[in-house]
Amino acid sequence: MPVIVSAQETKKSTDNAPVANRTQRKKAKQKWKEDRIIERDNKKAIKEHHKRLQTKKTLKEMKKEKRKGDKMRTNKKEGFFMRLFKRE
């Protein structure tokens, strides 16, 4: 005799799965947020440290070097591909 199963008689084994997935996702999201906050704080502390290191004298030297670099670059010709694909 063949076994006949209707849709109403099937077992629902996935009733708790979405709830478990939701709680896992929620915990993962909370952990991600905490890690993100810690990472942001670390980056901010590093940035502040670098700013503290840059005294007036250091900034002056950086500006001088930048000007020197700009002056050197003005004497160079355009890049190869820029010259090659130049619209005329």
Image (cartoon, helix red, strand yellow):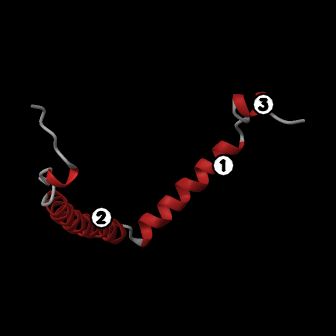
- Closer to the chain start, of discs 1 and 3, is 1
Q: The residue under label 2 is which amino acid type? A: Lys
Give coordinates of residue 58: x percent, y percent: 42, 64
Q: Nearer the viewer, mark 1 or mark 2?
A: 2
Say above or below: 13 vs 19.
above
- SS label for mark 1: helix
**Residue ID at (71%, 29%):** 81
Left or right: 59, with 72 as reference point: left
Q: Residue under circle 2?
A: 43
Q: The residue under label 3 is which amino acid type? A: Phe
Q: Residue furthest left?
A: 1
Give coordinates of residue 64: x percent, y percent: 55, 58
Q: Residue under circle 3?
A: 85
As measured in the structure, the alpha-carbon distance from the residue carrying label 1 to the one carrying label 2 is 33 Å
Quadrant of the rendered image containing residue 48:
bottom left
Quadrant of the rendered image containing residue 42:
bottom left
**Residue ID at (33%, 65%):** 50
**Residue ID at (20%, 66%):** 26
Quadrant of the rendered image containing residue 3:
top left
Quarter holding the C terminus is top right
- Closer to the chain start, of discs 1 and 2, is 2
Q: Residue under circle 1?
A: 71
Left or right: 75, with 88 as reference point: left
